Amino acid sequence: MRRSQRTCSRTSSTSFRATRSTRPRCSRPSEQRSVLPLRCDKAGPLRRNKTVKAEQQSFAAIAEQHLDDVLAYLVYLTADHSLAEDLTVETFERALRRWNRFDPRRGGARTWLCQLARSAALDHFRSEGRRLRREERYAVRELREVPGPSFGESLSSELEHALAELSRAEREVVALRVVLELDGETASRVLGISPSACSTRLSRALQKLEGMVSADAVA
């Protein structure tokens, strides 16, 4: 009788262990995470397309808002309306290529565009200077009829003549401070000079303009 009880007890214990061994083991949290399927973000391409479209739309709005200002700045800088139009196109092409690098925390869009416009104009002047030197056309230019400067239809002939007598740097600071109404700090940042130097250059340019326009009026 006791032997049968021990046998029964041993059998029950063996059966219990077998039951425990066949029970599925609960994995640790790290193991559970490792076997979970990776989530596929099906909206990824769509989200990227929306982002690209939003950036393009915002650039289009900026371009439309500041197109006239950039053109006016380049007209004063180059004293050539046709050239200014070409450089305006070049400016906005550069802006579109670099739009993802524009940081509004470092300055407004108009300031950034004026900096690009200035760079495009200086590149043109350097290229044109090399071309003229290479072709030795300085003497020939005196024999050709060179069109006079053009700053816009709204200016009087006296003021256009006075602007033409200013240096390129003086016309540029007049365009930034008077035409575009940029503050001294912003204009100096575009020009790459100190605010005090910008103020001095503007004062000198305005004094020259006042003197020339007054002299023409008296004459």
Image: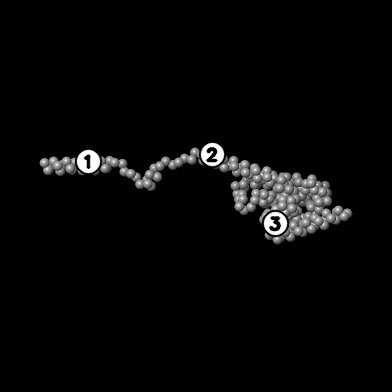
Which residue is denoted by mark 3 in the rendering? 184
Q: Of marks 3 and 1, which one's residue comes earlier in the chain?
A: 1
**Marks 3/1: CA–CA distance:** 92 Å
Q: How many marks?
A: 3
Which residue is denoted by mark 1 in the rendering? 15
Q: Of marks 3 and 2, which one's residue comes earlier in the chain?
A: 2
| Residue 110: percent from left, percent from top | 67, 49
Describe the element under mark 3 as helix, strand or loop.
Answer: helix
Q: Are marks 1 and 2 in contact (CB under 8 Å)?
A: no
- Amino acid type indicated by mark 2: Leu
Please say whether residue 117 is visible from this viewpoint. yes
Q: Of marks 1 and 2, which one's residue comes earlier in the chain?
A: 1
Left or right, 53 with reference to 138 = left
**Marks 1/2: CA–CA distance:** 58 Å
**Marks 3/2: CA–CA distance:** 44 Å
The residue sitting at the right extreme is 219
| Residue 49: percent from left, percent from top | 56, 40
Residue in view at x 12 percent, y 43 percent: 2
- Amino acid type indicated by mark 3: Gly
Which residue is denoted by mark 2 in the rendering? 46
Residue in view at x 68 percent, y 45 percent: 65
| Residue 27: percent from left, percent from top | 34, 45
